[in-house]
Image: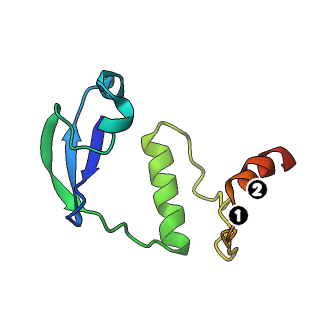
Amino acid sequence: MYFHYKAPDSNLLEVFEVPDNFFLTFKDFIADMGKRPYWGKSIGFMSDKLPQLKGEELLHKLHEMKTKAGFEVNEQDNSLHIDQQIEPKKNVNFLGRFFSMFNR
């Protein structure tokens, strides 16, 4: 498993190779989650900028990820509607988000 750590003063992510029980080994989970891991193997750095995929690129990447995860993927399945725009809800407070879970 890989854990990505972002130092507050850097635009790079440090990638750590860690065992599957990594999150269970924190002495103080809440405090330690934001700190550089004190165990695991650092395997390098990568940019914290994510690629901005659109349309067919995103659909291809989703199919690729599903295939790697062991799912059968029908390349003709365009369940992602490329022309559909999803706008995030703005200025919704915690209670609004919480109660929206029950309105689905």
Residue 97 placement, left or right of 57: right
Q: Which residue is mark 2?
A: 96
Asked which secondary structure carries label 2, the reply is: helix
In terms of image quadrants, where is residue 51?
A: bottom left
In this view, 62 is above or below 37: below
| Mark count | 2
Q: Residue at x 53, y 71 (%)?
A: 56
On the image, the x and y values in percent for residue 31 come to: 33, 37
Could you tell me which residue is drawn at 50 percent across and 46 percent down? 66
Q: Which residue is mark 1?
A: 92
The residue shown at (70%, 64%) is 92
Q: Is residue 72 above or below residue 8?
A: above
Name the quadrant containing residue 27.
top left
Residue 34 numbered tag? none
Foreground of the two, 19 or 81: 19
Q: Is residue 99 left or right of residue 82?
A: right
Q: Amino acid at mark 2?
A: Gly
Q: Between residues 23 and 45, which one lies in front from this camera angle?
A: 23
